[in-house]
Structures are given as structure tokens and as C-alpha cells.
């Protein structure tokens, strides 16, 4: 009997001391409901997954440079994208010869091998692609920055400036 009582009192002691460590930290934590301020800021260096775009409208193309790697793969991607997005108006070799659509446009699409275009910097060509130029449409909704640089690379290659 005494033994059982002794055991019981030990159990009660254990149970009580467990209670002693019970606190309300989890319940009382500083937390916020969804959309409640203050909102959490994205950690420094985090990369957007929602394709937020840089607006180049007021940027001078001359100041832009391609920071993406250049290799066989990116050149091949640039060539492919040129075939999809530019070929309707600019010929595969960069000129406008033999392009039925080009003949119907006024002004005609620029000959990408002409002095006017070969004298543009890489950044200016990129800018023409993303923001458009004159009656040429802007491609910022179709091409990511990265892709537009790949197309730029391809144009530079057609101009033998790569
Ligand atoms: C719908 C036809 C069309 C498509 C598609 C098109 N362009 Fe053009 N592009 C033009 C026209 C037209 C001009 C001349 C615009 C002007 O002088 O007003 C031009 C001009 C240019 C110029 C010269 C700009 C300058 O400063 O003289 C470049 C570079 C160029 N296009 C590159 C491209 C690239 C790269 C693509 C594909 C991403 C593309 N274009 C797609 C019609 C097109």
C-alpha cells in the first residue's frame, strides 16, 4: 500500500512538473493574419517567381548590357525565337528580301544588316525588341528579358558582330 502511494505521489510530481514547463508561447506568438499589416518583406536576394518585368520604356538602350551567359545553347534559342517572332517581317538572313509581309508595310521593316542597325549597340537592339520601334510591335509580353537578349544575340550574329 505504501509502495503504491509512493508511486502515485511520484507520478503526480512528474505530471505537475510537466505542467510547470507548459507555457503559452505558441498561442501568444506575434503573428499576423493574411494581408494584415505589417506584411513580410521578401528576403534580400530573393528571386521573383511571378515574372515581374522591368519597365524599359524610359531607359536608354545604350545603357543596357547583356548579363546572361552566351553559349551555343543561348544562340540556338535566340535563332529559334527569331524564327517565331521576327521572321514574319525580317528575313532569316536579317534583310527583308523575299518577305511578303515586309512589302505591305510602310515603313518597311528595317534591314537588320543595314548601317542604321549595325551601328546600334547590343542594348539598343534589345530595347527595340522589348519596347518596339515605330510601327514595329513591342515583344515584352511575348519574350522574357532573357529571351529578348538571346534574340539580340542572334541579330548580332547575323550582323557578324558576335
Ligand atoms: C510585324 C512586323 C515586324 C516584326 C514581327 C518584327 N519587326 Fe522589327 N521592324 C519592323 C518595322 C516595320 C521596322 C521599322 C520601324 C520603323 O522604322 O518605324 C522594324 C525595325 C526593326 C529594327 C531596327 C530599329 C532601328 O533602330 O532602326 C530592329 C533591330 C528590329 N526591327 C528587330 C526585330 C526583331 C529582333 C524582331 C523579333 C523579335 C522584330 N524586329 C520583329 C517590323 C517588324
Image (spheres, helix red, strand yellow):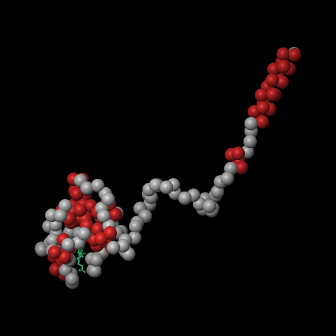
Count of numbered badges drawn on the protein:
0
Q: Residue at x 21, y 53 (%)?
A: 72
* Residue 3 shows in this picture: yes
Q: Residue at x 20, y 65 (%)?
A: 156
Rendering coords of residue 117 (x, y %): 20, 73
Find the residue positioned furthest to the bottom: 106
In the rendered structure, the answer to whether residue 136 lies left or right of residue 113 reads right
Above or below: residue 27 compared with residue 121 = above
Rendering coords of residue 31 (x, y %): 65, 54
In the rendered structure, the answer to whether residue 136 lies left or right of residue 95 reads right
In the rendered structure, the answer to whether residue 32 lies left or right of residue 145 reads right
Q: Nearer the viewer, residue 59 or 24?
A: 59
Q: Residue at x 74, y 42 (%)?
A: 23
* Residue 91 shows in this picture: no
Rendering coords of residue 19 (x, y %): 77, 35
Above or below: residue 22 compared with residue 154 = above
Q: Nearer the viewer, residue 63 or 33?
A: 63
Instruction: Specify the quadrant that holds the C terminus.
Output: bottom left
Instruction: Specify the quadrant that holds the N terminus.
Output: top right
Above or below: residue 78 compared with residue 100 = above
Quadrant containing ligand 1: bottom left
Find the residue positioned furthest to the front: 63
Find the residue positioned furthest to the right: 2
Amino acid at each position: 500500500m505504501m509502495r503504491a502511494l509512493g508511486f502515485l505521489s511520484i507520478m503526480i510530481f512528474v505530471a505537475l512538473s510537466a505542467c510547470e514547463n507548459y507555457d503559452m508561447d505558441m498561442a501568444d506568438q506575434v503573428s499576423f493574419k493574411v494581408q494584415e499589416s505589417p506584411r513580410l518583406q521578401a528576403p534580400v536576394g530573393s528571386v521573383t517567381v511571378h515574372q515581374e518585368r522591368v519597365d524599359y520604356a524610359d531607359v536608354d538602350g545604350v545603357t543596357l548590357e547583356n548579363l546572361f551567359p552566351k553559349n551555343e545553347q543561348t544562340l540556338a534559342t535566340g535563332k529559334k525565337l527569331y524564327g517565331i517572332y521576327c521572321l514574319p517581317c525580317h528575313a532569316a538572313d536579317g534583310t527583308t528580301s523575299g518577305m511578303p509581309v515586309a512589302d505591305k508595310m510602310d515603313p518597311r521593316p528595317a534591314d537588320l544588316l543595314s548601317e542604321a542597325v549595325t551601328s546600334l549597340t547590343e542594348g539598343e537592339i534589345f530595347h527595340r525588341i522589348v519596347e518596339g520601334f515605330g510601327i514595329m510591335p513591342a515583344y515584352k509580353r511575348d519574350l522574357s528579358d532573357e529571351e529578348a537578349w538571346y534574340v539580340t544575340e542572334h541579330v548580332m550574329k547575323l550582323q557578324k558582330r558576335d
